[in-house]
Image (cartoon, rainbow, N blue to C red):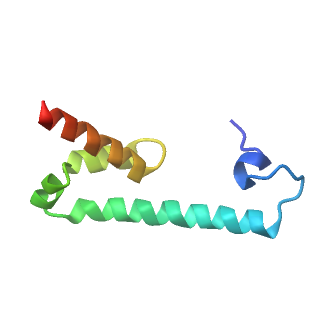
């Protein structure tokens, strides 16, 4: 699947503007920061992860799944909390 200009920069003009480029860099930086925060959970003690409703396996799964690691982790945590309430 090719990345089109609209998906990459979010505008329909033929030439990306400086604002388009700045937005692209900001989105990239946010995703990178969120991924680093998820990676940092791998060094957390298991009891802290349990307090969050997670396991190290959940963290690994979130990092290996396509898409945003923090979003994937949020989904896994919600699923684990629902299972715990049954």
In the displayed structure, would residue 26 be above or below residue 10? Answer: below
In the picture provided, is 28 more to the left or to the right than 55?
right
Q: Position of residue 63 (x, y in %)?
A: 37, 49
* Residue at image location 83% in from the left, 60% down from the top: 16
Q: Position of residue 36 (x, y in %)?
A: 39, 65
Q: Position of residue 42 (x, y in %)?
A: 25, 59
Quadrant of the rendering where the N terminus is positioned? top right
Q: Position of residue 7 (x, y in %)?
A: 71, 47
Quadrant of the rendering where the C terminus is positioned? top left
* Residue at image location 68% in from the left, 64% down from the top: 23
**Residue ranking furthest to the left:** 47
**Residue ranking furthest to the top:** 86
* Residue at image location 36% in from the left, 64% down from the top: 37
* Residue at image location 14% in from the left, 56% down from the top: 51
**Residue ranking furthest to the right:** 14
**Residue ranking furthest to the front:** 85
């Amino acid at each position: 699947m090719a990345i089109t200009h609209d998906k990459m920069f979010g505008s329909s003009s033929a030439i990306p503007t400086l604002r388009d480029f700045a937005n692209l860099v900001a989105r990239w930086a946010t995703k990178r920061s969120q991924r680093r925060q998820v990676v940092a959970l791998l060094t957390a003690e298991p009891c802290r992860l349990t307090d969050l409703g997670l396991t190290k396996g959940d963290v690994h799964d979130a990092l290996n799944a396509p898409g945003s690691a923090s979003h994937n982790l949020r989904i896994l945590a919600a699923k684990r909390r629902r299972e715990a309430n049954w």
